[in-house]
Image (cartoon, helix red, strand yellow):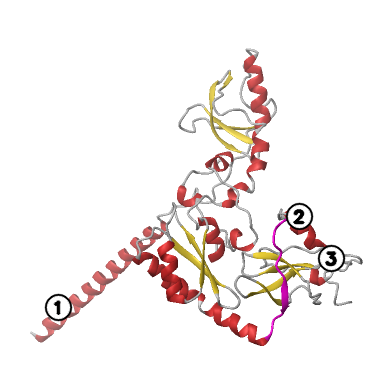
Amino acid sequence: MDNDFIGGNAGFNYKGCCKGDCQLGVTDYFSGIPASTNPDNYVEVQFKKTRKGFYLNSNNIPLEKGDIVAVEANPGHDIGTVTLTGRLVTLQMLKARLRPDAEIRRVYRKVRPADMEKYEEAKSREHETMIRARQIAKDLNLEMKIGDVEYQGNGEKAIFYYIADGRVDFRQLIKVLADAFHVRIEMKQIGARQEAGRIGGIGPCGRELCCSTWMTKFISVSTSAARYQDLSLNPQKLAGQCAKLKCCLNYEVDSYAEVLKHFPSKEVELETMDGTYYFFKADILQKQITYSTDKIFAAGAVTISSERAMKIIALNKKGIKPDNLLEEGNIQAPKHVDLLADTDLNRFDKQNQKNNRNRHKNRHGKGGQNGQRQQKAAQQSE
């Protein structure tokens, strides 16, 4: 099999695929297709995990996906990785809505060993710079938190990413940072979700955070998404590591909203010959509703389908009361079985009590035998 084709997807070159850890990656569907070259020689270059840009290959350097290049920056140059070439780059530029008069910087060259040495040296200072910058901001009594620092490839510029609740006057901070690190300073404010995406972590689902793996745009999440899914409004469970509502609350809310269109209102009461039934709980995905004869407790609970509930409501509007909630010939829907319902949770305590009683008897039994032996020995000595 040709090494250019993997997974049986004929026509898709392996260079057109993006690694799973590439958050900003785009699958190049034009890769390996004839006449898919870019006549404008634009390439997409990615720097850190959440930053990329478009550059002009004016020197016609033969570039492929994965090449490390030196590109024009202000000041000097920056080091990045080519993530996209060919015809798709122009389409991505249209998607990014670049202005016609926007400045497109150039690709200088492929990296040299000297460039990589400067690059590695600059990257090794990022964590130390972040810790020291946090202390400087604290000494200046600024209500802000510096979450990440990114050095330019040539080490002449540093971008400080920070979060703050309000506006921050960091003019004095920039002067102090420039004197401390002898680089050009750029401050960028980000939100709590963006900070979590830059730092990364493991979510309660056991997977890496969505914001640090594939999400690039953050849509606002409201508590109505949790209400649609009938989730408990517990802030500790609904909040993610950024202390905001979890982004995954929006993933299935559309499906729940579509199903709830066929559910009756919770305020509607069902009238039958047996009595009045009140809404108790609902299983949205199973399309089942449990009604109770009491508004608070599950007294005489009956589970029926949402379709049956709508039929009863329609009959009640006509002044007709069915005999009961269940349809004729149908039996009560099976309830969930609790495997621990008949299990005594105190069985271990009882076993321990039994063992303690046995130990107590044995001790007393041995004590009685010892006492008899002592009495016999005393009688013999007399």
Residue at the image point whose x is 47% and y is 76% from the top: 182
Any part of residue 199 in sight: yes
Residue at the image point whose x is 58% and y is 48% from the top: 249
Label 3, on which residue?
Answer: 38
Q: Nearer the viewer, residue 334 or 320?
A: 320
- Magenta-tinted stretch: 101-112
Task: Indicate the amino acid at tag 1.
Answer: Gln
The extreme right residue here reads 34
Q: Is residue 67 left or right of residue 87?
A: left
Look at the image and say whether residue 108 sits in the magenta stretch: yes
Task: Indicate the amino acid at tag 2.
Answer: Leu
Cα distance between the residues tagged 2 and 3: 14 Å
Q: Circles 1 and 2: CB distance less than 8 Å?
A: no
**Residue 1 bears which disc, if any?**
none
- 39 is higher (above) or lower (below) than 311: below
Q: Is residue 8 left or right of residue 184?
A: right
| Quadrant of the snapshot with the C terminus | bottom left
Label 1, on which residue?
Answer: 375
**Mark 3 or 1: the one toward you:** 3
- 3 is higher (above) or lower (below) than 142: below
Circle nearer the N terminus (3, 1): 3
Determine the secondary structure under disc 2: helix
Q: Please rate how many residues cluster around mark 2, counting C-alpha atoms within 10 Å: few if below 14, some from 14 to 19, many from 20.
A: few
Label 2, on which residue?
Answer: 94
- Give the main secondary structure, helix, strand or loop, of the magenta stretch: loop
Rendered location of residue 211, percent (x, y): 59, 59
Asked which quadrant contains residue 282, the reply is top right
Residue at the image point whose x is 49% and y is 31% from the top: 299
Q: Is residue 79 left or right of residue 192?
A: right
Any part of residue 285 in sight: no
Task: Indicate the amino acid at tag 3.
Answer: Asn
